[in-house]
Amino acid sequence: MKTHQTVSSSRRKSRKACLGAPSHLKRKLMSSHLSKELRAKYHVRSMPIRKDDEVVVMRGKHKSEKAKVTQVYRKKWTVYLEKKTREKQSGQSVNIPFHPSRLMITTLKLDKDRLNALGRRNKEAKEKGKVKGKDVEKSLD
């Protein structure tokens, strides 16, 4: 049942909006869950995945294997991991694509922009009353 007047509940329109999204919006859509330790430390449930993050595969043949992200390919909605390849029939080695929703981030590559994003999201959580006490800046030390 439609509850909001300005938002469409049409499957067709929501698929078009997601699959036809520009690259800067796909970045956000290609997010992965954080591990329990990171979630407790930063008070954030998920983050957009990026190169040099360390992840654990949560589904499929490579389940529970740890690896480092080597490439995030937004056009194909895939993430490529270090040393996760298969051989084609011709003998050529190709990377195995993973969907970001099937990965869990265990180590974040922290830079200035990512720290700002974590701080911003922590502040929002505090305002909503979900977090008591610690700031992200204090927990990073």
Image (spheres, helix red, strand yellow):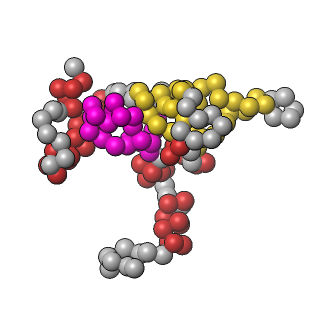
Percent x, y of residue 27: 45, 46
The C terminus: image quadrant? top left
Residue 72 shows in this picture: no
With 27 as the anchor, is 129 left or right in this view?
Answer: left
Q: Specify the segment rendered in magenta.
A: 31-50
Residue 116, position as x, y percentages in the image: 26, 35
Q: Is residue 37 above or below residue 130?
A: above
The foreground one among 37 and 25 is: 37
Residue drawn at (30%, 29%) of the image: 112
Q: Residue at x 48, y 68 (%)?
A: 14
> Where is residue 95 drawn, in percent x and y?
68, 33
Residue at image location 76% in from the left, 29% down from the top: 93
Residue 70: quarter of image: top right
Image quadrant of residue 121? top left
In the rendered view, tell whether residue 51 sits above or below residue 128: above
Closer to the camera, 49 or 105? 105
Check the image and report above or below for 40 versus 75.
Answer: above
Say if the magenta span includes residue 46. Answer: yes
Picture coordinates of residue 80 (x, y %)?
Answer: 59, 35
Residue 49 seen in the figure: yes
